[in-house]
Amino acid sequence: MPKQRTTSTNVRAMFTIGFLGIILAGALHHLLLVTAFTGAPQPLWEVDLTKNGYQGRPPILLGNADAGSMSWVYKQGVVFTEPDVVAAFFVVRDQTSNGAAEQSKASPSDTFRLETIFFNIHKGEYLKKLELPLPTDTHGFLFFPATNGQFIVGIGNALTLYSSDLKTVAQHTVQGKVEGIASPSGETVLLEEAQKVGGQWIEQFELLETERLTVLRSWKSAPQPNQILWGDEIGSMKYRSISIRTPDTEAKPLVSGEEWFCTYWRFINKETIAMCQQGPRPKLSVVSTDGKILHQFDLGLEQMDGPAVASRNGKRFAVPTMHWGWGGNKDPEKLIARVFGLDADKPILTLRVTPHYSSSPNFQTPEGDTRFGWGGLALSPEGELLAVKSGPIVQLYQLPEVGSSTKCVGDCSSENDATNSRPALAHRQPDSPMKMVAPSQLVERTLSWLPADTETAIAANGPFTLPDLNPEERNPPVHGDADETGEIFKSTPVGLFGFKKGLMGKYFKSEKVVLALEGSRHFRTPAGLGEGPYQGCDIAVFASDINVSADAFLKESSGVVLRTEQIEGQQVVVFQEKLEEDTWTTFVAFPKPKIAVAATNEEYLREVLARIKGKQGERALPESLPEWKYVNTHAEFWALRHYDKKGTSSDPTSPLRDENPSVIADEHAIGLTFYFDPDKSKTATVTYLSGDENILPKIQEHLFPIMSEPGAREMHIRYREIAPGVVEGSYDLDHIESAEVFTFVLAALLGHVVAL
C-alpha cells in the first residue's frame, strides 16, 4: 500500500531526479492555510459582518458571463474614517418577493444596496450604519475616506461627501458616471470621464479637494490608464512610459523597463511610491519620485494581490500578497498581509490571513484581487493600527509605535527577503560535522524488530497525533508553515496506515504517537503510474494503551476486510485495493497494547511480529554501519538507507544498478542519511556516503536537480565534503513548497519512487 502522498489527485511536479534515471511526478498534498502561524499576533478584536447583513463576496451567485458586467458587486473593503473609527463597506442584494435574498443566479431585476458598518477601534463595538441604494445600471461605486472624519461615496453620476454623523456635506455631479481615484492622504480626489471627440477618445479630468468637493483643476488629455494620486501629484503608467506630473507641470519619467509595468502601484507619500517589479523573482520596490530605488523586498513564491495601502501620514504602508501553491485550484493557498515602514527593507508585521473564498468566479483588477486584495487592508491615519477584512471577518491589529520600525510583530524572519542575512544558529549548519548521540532505547528496540535485510529506515519522533492520511478529506492545518511541514514529514513513516482512503485514521486521531518507524526493502518499478511496490512495515508506538481504538477499528472495518489471518499468534486483518496499475495488499496488526503495525508483505510482517514477541536475530541496519555517524536520531525526523547490492537489478532507485542510464550511477555507493529538526532549525541535512572520494561534483550537479520547481531555489542548496567520499547537503525549508519538493525527492532517494 503506497504512502497517501502518491495517491493524491493533485499531481503537480515532473522532473528527472539524479541517479534515479526515471521521471518522477510529485503527488504533493494541497495544504490550505487558514490561520496565522504559531506565534502570530492576535487581533485586538474581531467582528463577523454576517450579523450586520453581509451576504458574501459577491452577494449573489455569478457565472463567468456575469462576472465582467457585474464585477462591482464584489467591491467591498475596510477603511478608517476617523482615527478611532473603522468602517466596513459591502454590497447586499435586496430581498426577493418571497422575503429572502437567496444565493440564486443573477437576474436583471435584482436590486442592490451599499451598506457601510462603523465600529469603534477600542472593542469593535457597533456604532452606526449607512445604507445607500445602488441602481441596477450603476456600473459600480466609489468609497474613499476623506479628512476630519468625513468620507466620500460615488454612485451613478454623483460624488457625495458625508460627515462623521452621516449627513451630506457636499455633492459634485458629472455628465456620465463617476469614476476616479483618491489620494491616500484623504485630501484630494481625481475624477476622470471618457469622451469621444472627432472620432478620438479623450479624458476629462477634475481634481477636487475633499473638504467641500471644490474643483481645484480641470483639464483634458489623451486617456491615462492606471493612474495614482497624492495631493496634486499624479502618476501615470503606460507601456514603456511611467511618469509623474501635476496638473500644472510636464510629466517626468519615473522608471523604465518592462519589469516595472505592473498595475499594482500606489503613492505612499508625496515623495515615495510602492511598486511591484515583475520577473523570475518578483519584488516589492519602494521608489522615490525622482526614480531612485530606496528599498526592495523579494516576494519569492508570492505575488502582489493588490496595490499597497498607505497610512494617511505617509509613514507606513500595507501590502496584500497571495501564493497559489501546488494544488492548481482556482483559489490561492495563502493570503498574506505585511506592513512596512519607510526606513527598512523588512516588514514590521507579517500576518497570515484567513481566506473566505466565493464559489463565484474570482479575478484580479487594478485595485486588487476580488478574494482579498480588493479593499482588504487599511492603516489608521497615524499608522499604528491595521484593519484586515477577509470575507465577513474584520480584525484589528496593534502595530509598534511609529518610529520603532525595527520592532517586528509576527514572522520576523523576513522569509522572502533574499538580501536578509539569517541568524546562523537558526538557519545554517555548523562548519564541522555534528557529533551524533546514540539512538534512544526506544529507537534501538524498534530497530531490532525489523528484518536484518531492511535497507531503509524512516522515523518521526513524537509525541504527535497521526496526520490526516486521506488527502481527499484533509482538514486544513491550524498554524501555518511550521505545522504544515511537520504534517508532511510525519506522513512518511505512517503512510501505510492510510489504506482505504485513511480508513484507520479516524479511530486513532486522539492517540499520541511517541515513535513512528518504517522499515523497507526490495524496491521495484511500478507496473504503470504511481509509487513503486516494496516490502516494508510501518510501526507506530503510542504513548498509551490503544486497545479500545483498535477494537473499534476492527469491528467497524469488517465489511471491507479482504481476510483475517493468524500470523505468529497475532490476529492480522488484510486489506486490498488497486492504485494505478498495481494492486496493494496491507496487513494490519496490534501486537501489543501500545503498538500498531501495517505492512505491505506477509513475509516481512511475520519477521516483525516474531521479533516483537522476542525472537533474537541480527539487527537491521547494525550500529557498525558508517551511516550512523551522520544521522541525528534525536531529531524530530530522520532516515537512513544502506544500499543493498543484492537487490540492485530490480531497484530503479539504486545507484549501484548496472543498467541505470543516469550519469550519477555510483558503483561505490554506500548509503545516505537524513535528519530535520524544524523546532530548532529550518535546515534539513542529507549526507551521501560513497567509496568514491571524488563524488562531490556529481552530487552537486545531480542529487537534487530540481531548480526549476517552485520552492527549489528557496532551499539555497549547499554541499560540502566532510570526510573522504562523504558529502553533506543542506536544504532550507522555510517555505512549504520547499518542504514539499524536498520530501518528495527524499522519498525517492530512500527507495520510494513515483513514476509518471
Image (cartoon, rainbow, N blue to C red):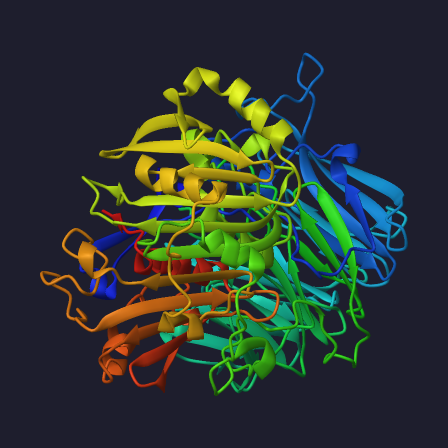
Residue 68 x/y as whole percent: 46, 40
The residue drawn where x is 60% and y is 40% is 594
Residue 721 appears in the figure: yes
The residue drawn where x is 56% and y is 55% is 442
Residue 260 appears in the figure: no
The residue drawn where x is 67% and y is 69% is 317
Residue 118 x/y as whole percent: 83, 46
User: In the visual, does 664 lie left or right of 399?
Assistant: left
User: In the visual, does 721 lie left or right of 126?
Assistant: left
Quarter occupied by the N terminus:
top left
Extreme residue toward the left, this view: 659
The quarter holding residue 109 reads top right
The quarter holding residue 397 reads bottom right
User: In the visual, does 733 lie left or right of 720?
Assistant: right
Residue 294 x/y as whole percent: 57, 85
Q: Which is nearer the eye, 661 or 147?
A: 661
Q: Which is nearer the eye, 232 or 727?
A: 727
Q: Which is nearer the eye, 478 or 177?
A: 478
Q: Which is nearer the eye, 415 or 288?
A: 415
Looking at the image, how many numbered discs can be counted on the residues? 0
Residue 613 x/y as whole percent: 48, 40
